[in-house]
Amino acid sequence: MEYLIAFTIVMVFMLIGDWISAATKAFIPSIFITAVLFAIGFWTIIPKDIVAKASFNTAFTGMGVSLLLVHLGTLMSLKELINQWKAVCIALLGVLGTLVLTLTVGTLIFDWHTVVAAIPPLTGGMVATLLMTDGLKAAGATTLVALPVSMFILHSFIGYPLTAILLRKEGRRLKEELKSGKGHIDPDAPKVTGMAASLDTKKHILNLPEQFQSPVFIIVRVALIALLGNWLAGLMNGVINANVICLILGVLAHQFGLLEDNALTRAGVFNWLIYGLMAYVFSQLSLTTPDIIGGILVQILVLIALGILGMFIASYLLAKPFGMSKQMAFACSLTALFGFPADFILTTEVCRTIADNEQEEEYLTQNMLPKMLVGGFATVSMASVIIASVFLKLI
């Protein structure tokens, strides 16, 4: 019964966030509300291990991330993935803007070790946070461990609402574009919304009789591709992150007809995996306390302001040359704060609540989701690993 109670509490927190987001048309994003509820709970009466007791532990997360990344590959085509090089450039140059301002102005204000320990989560979200905390513990710099964790917690509270505002502004712009006739839905792009995906007529290599096209058949194929991705990453000794390989293999499998559009949604397990992964992300809020954050609050807030200002300057200057609106470019840069799955949830949530019908939702999703996903992978899955590794040597 203890495990069922833990699961129920976790899901109630998710539900409250979802309802508030729906009521405010994603002006207040669900993950922001859920993060606040978890923080308050951990700092008051909720057990620190409630997420693990709800079955969303490290093993679940390792499996879930790989499966979801293969699934995300079925939401974009190979051509579309290649075409998102502009989003990659803007996201990476936004990270560069963060590094420039924090390592110059930041080090003039605060101690060098404080800045170096706190900055990586601004350029790689949870991935960089975990790398920095593990590295600092291994190096014996335990007094600095609270910095990356606190940075991750506080910048999430700022990054989620700010990104949602930018995406809402971009969504309204795209709606007007579609209504005016200037925008058109790409018929060849993978279908993301539920009804559109059900109309998928693409030919598949494994075109078995209908009685064999079961949800578990989809899950097995996704699992095999995820397994291949992790095996290849092991062969390369992690030179290319396993997450990136899983995404690319998912795109290729979808491109050549091995996987359907929106694979795990068709299999009925997507929401279960995404909620479990987000619960695990929120469980990191248990690593700190109000007292710890209070002691370093000024340093963290100033560095967040400098980091986001650096992203804004870079994206503002690059938006026009790269053919993006300023709000879309800035949102791509902000994916460095959280990455997947938050970038997926924020974007689809805004598309769903801003759109008046499924056609608009499909158009918004086609134009916003690939940029956000690819931008997030460029920063969180690639740049963050490099930056955190380098910064650990600078402590």
Image: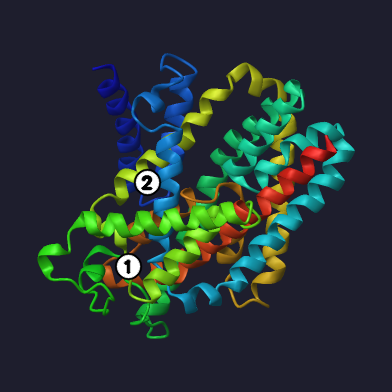
- Labels in figure, total: 2
Q: Is residue 81 visible?
A: yes
- Across and down, in percent, residue 196 comes to 25, 71
- For the C terminus, give its image quadrant: top right
**Local secondary structure at mark 2:** helix
Nearer the observer, 246 or 162: 246
Nearer the observer, 384 or 36: 384
Q: Residue at x 49, y 57 (%)?
A: 229
Q: Residue at x 64, y 51 (%)?
A: 237
* Residue on which the image places disc 2: 274
* Residue on which the image places disc 1: 259
Q: Is residue 258 above or below residue 201?
A: above
Q: Residue at x 48, y 37 (%)?
A: 281
- Across and down, in percent, residue 102 comes to 79, 45
**Local secondary structure at mark 1:** loop
- For the N terminus, give its image quadrant: top left
Q: Is residue 345 visible?
A: no
Extreme residue in the top direction: 45
Label 2 to label 1, Cα distance in Å?
19 Å
Whichever of labels 2 and 1 marks the residue nearer the N terminus, that label is: 1
- Across and down, in percent, residue 53 comes to 36, 24
Q: Looking at numbered disc 2 in the image, what kind of residue is underneath it?
A: Ile
Quadrant housing residue 189: bottom left
Left or right position of 299 against 384: right
Nearer the observer, 179 or 248: 248
Extreme residue in the front direction: 235
Q: Is residue 21 above or below residue 173?
A: above
Left or right position of 346 against 298: left
Quadrant housing residue 107: top right
